[in-house]
Amino acid sequence: MTDDSQTPSPTAPPSPAASPRLLALRQQIDAIDRQLLALLNERARIAEAVGEVKRAEGSPFFRPDRVAQVIANIEAANPGPLRNQHVAAIWREIMSACLALEAPLRVAVLGPEGTFCEQAAIDYFGSAADLIYCPSFDEVFHATAAGTAQFGVVGVENSTEGVVARSLDLFLRSPVHIVGEISLLVRHNLLRQTPSLDGIEVVMAHPQALAQCQGWLSTHLPHAERRAVASNAEGARLATTNPAWAAIASERAAAQYALHIVAHAIQDEAYNRTRFAVICLPQTMATPPASGRDCTSLVVSVPNRPGAVHDLLRPLKAHGVSMTRFESRPAKSGQWEYYFYIDLAGHPSQPHVAAALQELQGLCAFYKMLGAYPVSE
């Protein structure tokens, strides 16, 4: 009788021995890694001291203009071979980790985990930020205005489908203002429990994502129901509950919910980008200083008389201010009145912009500055 406990188990073939030259290079890398670790911890200790000074002086802990300045300086000093975009990503994470030692940031985003909104927040604040997942943009605004989160990130515009109407409506009454923006290249993927298009009865996604993929869906899944849900990640979560359901979401969501990517990049426009606004209460962060590449966002309404909308443009032309976006939304008053959302190139601290804004305000029945902030790359 064979004693199984004595039977040797099969083992994988041993890996080939490293050459002396490779071992020497690895030892150099290990030594450099230890030096890097020591320097990073030294930087972190100084960051903690900075936090104590900020706390005593009442200064804001998070300064996006300072983050941008540090990254710009590092990129300018970078001799290579590392690319600037990779250096910037590394330094953003270093600064995020150090800021977490000073005062962890609470950031409200559209949830659940795996949304593009989550990705935008990580790209802007770094992965050390404490993300608060909200079921809707309404809740992101509420959490930020109530102080549950110090900052919020909300989608405002897509290059294919235009503005995110709900976000614009929420800006109208909320006390928050915009202090930053980030633009993401959005690639939508079809996710499912099994790696096949066969038998898909329902495709779930945020309404914007469904609209951005309508051509692909009409061609490849013409009979599947298109079901709108609160977020793409919520669609991915729901797809785990039924083998006949599929979702449109990110690769991040596919990994998060262990789903197969049945089809990659199914958006109708290859260069599909979404702008996200970073919001907070004015007492959390004041309007950032001018960076040289800024956007000023407004919402206004004008008296319901002939030529009133045309008159809005005169101060901009007279003072040489460029308008980069003009959107209308119904005022819901029943009187066919509208609010106009306007983006201007420039910062209110610039004399020509300030003069145009002052003159523009005098023409408006309603005027609200939504924010002035650096334009994303």
Image (cartoon, rainbow, N blue to C red):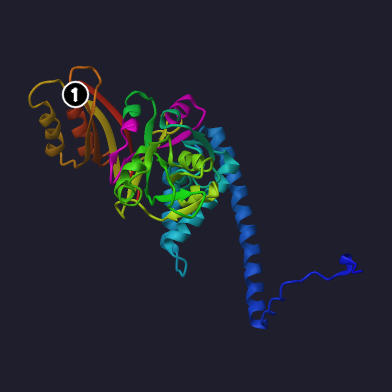
Q: Is residue 150 above or below residue 89?
A: above
Q: What is the three-letter code of the residue carrying label 1?
A: Cys
Q: In terms of image quadrants, where is residue 354?
A: top left
- Near-viewer residue (256 or 271): 256
Quadrant in the picture for residue 325: top left
Going 54% across and 46% down the picture, which residue do you hit? 257
Q: Is residue 49 left or right of residue 297?
A: right
- The answer to whether residue 369 shows anywhere in this view is yes
Q: Position of residue 188 (x, y in %)?
A: 39, 50
Q: Residue furthest left?
A: 306
Indicate the position of residue 377 as horizontal and vertical percent values: 34, 51
Q: Helix, strand or loop at disc 1?
A: loop
Residues shaded magenta:
140-168
Q: Residue furthest right?
A: 1
Relative to the observer, which residue lies in front, 12 or 374? 12
Q: Is residue 13 above or below residue 178?
A: below
Residue pictured at 88% horizontal, 65% vertical: 5
Q: Is residue 127 left or right of residue 318?
A: right
Is 364 situated left or right of 278 in this image?
Answer: left
Residue 288, can we see it? no
Asked if residue 150 is positioned above or below residue 195 in the image, the reply reads above
In the rendered image, residue 9, in percent from the top left (x then y), is placed at: 80, 69
User: Which class describes the residues within 10 Å of circle 1: few (<14), some (14-19), or many (20+)?
Assistant: some
Residue lying furthest top: 334
Q: Confirm whether the magenta stretch covers residue 141.
A: yes
Q: How many marks?
A: 1
* Residue at x 20% of width, y 20% of height: 365
Residue 57, given in percent of the width and then of the height, sits at 53, 33
* Location of the N terminus (image quadrant): bottom right
Residue 170 within the magenta-colored segment of the rendering: no
Please name the residue that numbered disc 1 is placed on: 364
